[in-house]
Image: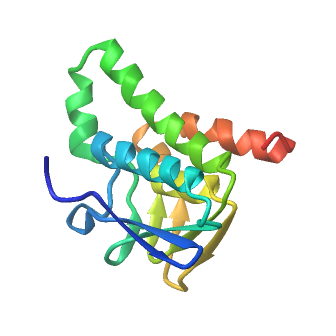
């Protein structure tokens, strides 16, 4: 296993989860997504936690999917691709339906899946230099996974 993909700090009732892949612009891979799901599940069960703050280490909140991991998925089985997509969908749903207040502290660019993390949070506070966008459309991807979260919120379902 590589270095920790997230760091977790707690101060009183606030739990801070930091994406910790700054050399990869906090790009999302299966290890990071799994660690985030585990951290949010732990926060859900911690009675002393009232607020979860999600941020990124370094100058980028998150660049979205790790392109190297996506490239590997091109030659992977259908089942592997479905698992990868379902894991990301589980992360967005976990954040969106979290019983604690979730604040995205956007310290830099949040694009593609990174913007999805922001969209799933209850509140977002962004640095003046932050840029947000679903830039995956520029390379032919549809932001389909996060769209289900956004549409549900627009309808008032979540």
Up/down of 4 relative to 14, above or below: above
20, 148: nearer the viewer: 20
Q: Position of residue 6 (x, y in %)?
A: 32, 61
Up/down of 66 relative to 20, above or below: above
Looking at the picture, the colour scheme in use is rainbow
Up/down of 119 relative to 52, above or below: above
Q: Position of residue 66 (x, y in %)?
A: 29, 48
Q: Is residue 110 visible?
A: yes
Q: Pick the quarter of the image with the C terminus.
A: top right
Q: Position of residue 124 (x, y in %)?
A: 63, 70
Looking at the image, which residue is at 54% across and 65% down? 132
**Residue 147 picture quarter:** top right
124, 139: nearer the viewer: 124
Q: Is residue 135 visible?
A: no
Q: Is residue 57 shown left or right of residue 44? A: left
Looking at the image, which residue is at 59% across and 50% down? 95
Looking at the image, which residue is at 47% across and 56% down? 114
Looking at the image, which residue is at 48% across and 51% down? 42
Q: Position of residue 33 (x, y in %)?
A: 38, 45
Q: Is residue 85 shown left or right of residue 80? A: right
Q: Residue furthest toward the bottom?
A: 128
Q: Residue furthest toward the top?
A: 78
131, 5: nearer the viewer: 5
């Amino acid at each position: 296993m590589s270095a920790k993909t997230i760091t977790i700090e707690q101060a009183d009732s606030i739990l801070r989860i930091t994406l910790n892949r700054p050399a990869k612009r906090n790009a999302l891979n299966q290890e990071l997504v799994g660690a985030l799901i585990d951290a949010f599940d732990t926060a859900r069960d911690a009675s002393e936690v009232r607020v979860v703050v999600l941020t990124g280490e370094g100058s980028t909140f998150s660049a979205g999917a790790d392109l190297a991991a996506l490239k590997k998925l091109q030659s992977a089985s259908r089942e592997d691709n479905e698992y990868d997509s379902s894991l990301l969908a589980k992360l967005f749903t976990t954040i969106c339906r979290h019983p604690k207040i979730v604040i995205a502290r956007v310290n830099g660019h949040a694009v593609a899946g990174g913007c999805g993390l922001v969209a799933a949070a209850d509140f977002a506070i962004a640095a003046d230099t932050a840029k947000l966008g679903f830039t995956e459309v520029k390379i032919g991807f549809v932001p389909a996974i996060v769209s289900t979260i956004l549409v549900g919120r627009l309808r008032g379902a979540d």
